């Protein structure tokens, strides 16, 4: 089956490393994952609680806004939907922000996403991976260890979050880290939604 390469992208077999800020240093005793926002009660989970959740293995294509695409990377992780068992959402929740560590702030990075798009096997908080050239291995600290959110292939990869720390549930959409810096709120690579102002892509 021939893969569809989004416009403006090139295919690579490598998994490039790009990130903002420093590399998070994991300490299990202090690590936690928080579910908050439009919920009846905020919940924080320990690393052990997260790792006890059911696991999903899924092969996902990744499309980075810096123009590379990597096909057929297989991840093992916890599906986004598994976290919904811990919270009762308020009425009309339709969006989320997925948070990650940035420069000492556990919630310094964020990306906004529509809730309905995250219910499948391709929205994963991952901890290990493989591809046709690599056997199973843990994701490295530079790739987001211990937990990295990988979004479905219908979003540019900035909609994921390295060093994931939590999910905020929202009734209305709200820009995340890159979105407030001019990037697209919807970020569909197949429609080349790189910037919030489409004229910026022509500069």
Image (cartoon, helix red, strand yellow):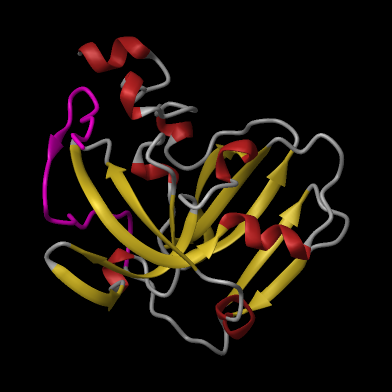
Q: Residue furthest front?
A: 1
Q: Magenta residues, as a range?
A: 1-22
Say if 37 sits above or below 137 in the image.
above
- Residue plotted at (34% across, 50% down): 60
Q: Nearer the viewer, residue 42 or 93?
A: 93
Count every numbered label the image shows and give the total. 0
Is 6 positioned to the left or the right of 47 in the image?
Answer: left
Nearer-the-camera pick, 144 or 56: 56
From the viewer's side, name the closer residue of 141 and 149.
149
Quarter holding the N terminus is top left
Q: Nearer the viewer, residue 3 or 36?
A: 3
Q: Position of residue 80 (x, y in %)?
A: 58, 56
Q: Could you tell me residue 57's position as x and y percent?
A: 42, 64
Residue at x-position 20% and y-position 74%: 135
Q: Quadrant of the C terminus?
A: top left
Residue 106 pos. (x, y %) = 53, 65
Residue furthest to the bottom: 29
Where residue 161 sits, quadrant-wise, is bottom left
Q: Position of residue 33 (x, y in %)?
A: 61, 69
The image quarter in which residue 131 lies: bottom left
* Relative side of 104 to 193, left or right: right
Please give the name of the residue rendered at 36% of the width and 37% of the height, measured from the top-left corner: 156
> What secondary structure predominates along the stretch shown in magenta?
loop
Q: Is residue 50 left or right of residue 11?
A: right
Q: Is residue 28 above or below residue 88?
A: below
Q: Is residue 151 magenta?
A: no
Please determine whether, in this image, residue 58 is positioned above or below residue 112. below
Q: Residue at x 36, y 66 (%)?
A: 144
Placement of 94 over or under 110, stated as above or below: above
């Amino acid at each position: 089956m021939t893969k569809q390469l989004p416009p403006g992208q090139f295919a690579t077999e490598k998994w490039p490393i790009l990130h903002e800020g420093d590399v998070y240093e994991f300490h299990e005793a202090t690590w936690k994952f928080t579910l908050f926002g439009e919920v009846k009660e905020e919940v924080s989970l320990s690393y052990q609680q997260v790792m006890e959740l059911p696991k999903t293995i899924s092969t996902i294509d990744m499309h980075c806004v810096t123009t590379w695409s990597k096909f057929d990377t297989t991840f093992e992780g916890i599906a986004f939907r598994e976290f919904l068992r811990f919270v009762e959402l308020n009425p009309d929740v339709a969006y989320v922000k997925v948070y990650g560590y940035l420069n000492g702030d556990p919630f310094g990075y964020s990306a906004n996403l529509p809730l309905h798009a995250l219910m499948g096997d391709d929205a994963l908080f991952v901890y290990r991976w493989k591809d046709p050239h690599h056997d199973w291995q843990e994701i490295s600290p530079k790739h987001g260890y211990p937990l990295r959110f990988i979004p479905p292939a219908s979003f540019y990869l900035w909609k994921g979050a390295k060093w994931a720390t939590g999910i905020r549930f929202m009734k209305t959409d709200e820009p995340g880290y890159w979105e407030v810096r001019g990037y697209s709120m919807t970020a569909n690579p197949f429609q080349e939604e790189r910037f919030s102002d489409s004229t910026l892509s022509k500069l």
